[in-house]
Amino acid sequence: MLSTSATAVVFPAHDGLVGILNGRAPLLCELGTGVLRVDSTEGGTKEVFIDAGFAQVLNNEVTILTERAELAENISRSAAEKALSEAEALPAHDEASVGARQKAIARAKTQVSIAKK
């Protein structure tokens, strides 16, 4: 769980990135897979891999409910690269398996992109 004051929050909605600043109107949306970025009021930035769920913005608070969240600093580059190789090796025989393969590849590529070196 991440709870902090922020100057800005950016998250992947199901149809693109959404940026939230102070005073944003209420919002409820479906999340996609990608990177949640939180710009802290102390000046630092946190990146978190998230995988689907929902986001709510209400009264200057952003609530993210996701099936999976992992701080970038806790993602191993080698494990992410291994997951990418495994995802690329998944069979794609029909529409469902093609979709599952594409999602697995997207997840792994995102993790590789934010993983610690």
Image (cartoon, grey):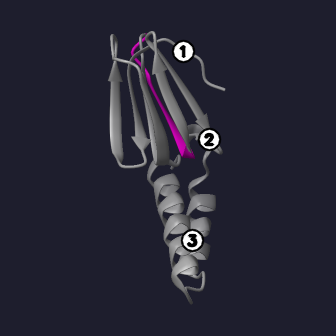
- Magenta stretch: includes residue 40: no
Verify CB contact (< 8 Å) between mark 3 and mark 2: no
Q: Give the side of residue 17 with respect to residue 72, left or right.
A: left
> What secondary structure is found at the residue carrying circle 2?
strand
Chief secondary structure of the magenta portion = strand
Element under disc 1: loop
* Dot 1 amino acid type: Thr
Residue range corresponding to the magenta coloring: 42-52
Please report whichever mark, 3 or 1, sits nearer to the chain's N-terminal start. 1
Label 3 or label 1, whichever lies nearer to me, is 3
Q: Give the residue at mark 3.
A: 100
Q: Quadrant of residue 59?
A: top left
Residue 25 in the image: x percent, y percent?
Answer: 34, 17
Q: Which residue type does callout 3 highlight?
A: Ala
- Taking the spot 35% from the left edge, 24% from the top edge, the residue there is 20
Residue 111 vertical position relative to residue 42 in the rendered view, above or below: below
